[in-house]
């Protein structure tokens, strides 16, 4: 089983870029699908992006399409979320999560991810 630690959050202005990182412990990172979710104040947690264990398939919420890029480096046990053209509505706590599955399909359902990091705050000012 892996443990996840996010980093890279902070304060940004609208239009800026941030790159979030999620470092995983353990030797089985490359067998997990990885996802990024976010939770804005007063709102439920929502899917942001996901990547299959191989890195070959990615999936994005509409809110991030064209602005966010998820990637992973299995040699470094790390998954990234590059966020460009940030908007104030991107303000949230961002969580990375891991999903162990034999399914060839990627998932946006947070209930299918069973390992979570502690989250990193992203605040975007206008």
Image: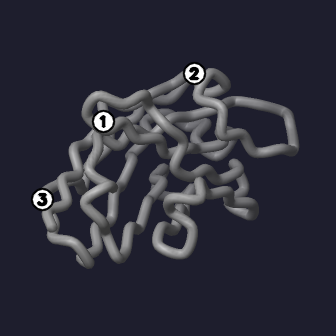
Residue 15 percent across, percent down from the top left: 26, 78
Q: Nearer the viewer, residue 5 or 36?
A: 36
Q: Which mark is residue 79?
A: none
Q: Earlier in the sequence, mark 2 or mark 1?
A: 2
Q: Which mark is residue 119?
A: 1
Quadrant of the image occupied by residue 96: top left
Nearer to us of marks 2 and 3 is 3
Element carrying mark 1: loop
The answer to whether residue 102 is left or right of residue 56 is right
The percent coordinates of residue 69 (x first, y second) are 51, 68
Tell whether 105 sits left or right of 26: right
Q: Residue at x 67, y 56 (%)?
A: 59
Mark 3 vs 1, N-terminal side: 3
Q: Position of residue 125 (x, y in %)?
A: 14, 62
- According to the picture, the residue beneath numbered tag 3 turns out to be 11
> Circle 2 sits in a helix, a strand or a loop, which is it?
loop
Mark 3–mark 1 distance (CA, rounded to whole Å): 15 Å
Q: Residues within 10 Å of mark 1 (few under 14, many from 20)?
A: many
Eyeballing the image, is 92 above or below 119? below
Q: Tell me what residue is drawn at x 36 percent, y 36 percent.
A: 39
Q: Residues within 10 Å of mark 3 (few under 14, many from 20)?
A: few
- The residue singled out by tag 2 in the image is 114
């Amino acid at each position: 089983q892996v443990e996840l630690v996010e980093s890279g959050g902070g304060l940004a202005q609208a239009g800026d870029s941030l790159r979030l990182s999620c470092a995983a412990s353990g030797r089985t990172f490359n067998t997990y699908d990885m996802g990024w979710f976010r939770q804005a104040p007063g709102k439920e947690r929502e899917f942001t992006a996901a990547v299959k264990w191989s890195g070959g398939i990615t999936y994005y919420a509409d809110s991030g399409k064209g602005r966010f890029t998820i990637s992973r480096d299995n040699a470094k046990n790390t998954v990234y979320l590059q966020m460009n053209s940030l908007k104030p509505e991107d303000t949230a706590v961002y969580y990375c999560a891991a999903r162990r599955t034999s399914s060839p399909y990627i998932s946006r359902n947070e209930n299918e991810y069973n390992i979570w990091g502690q989250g990193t705050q992203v605040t975007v000012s206008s």
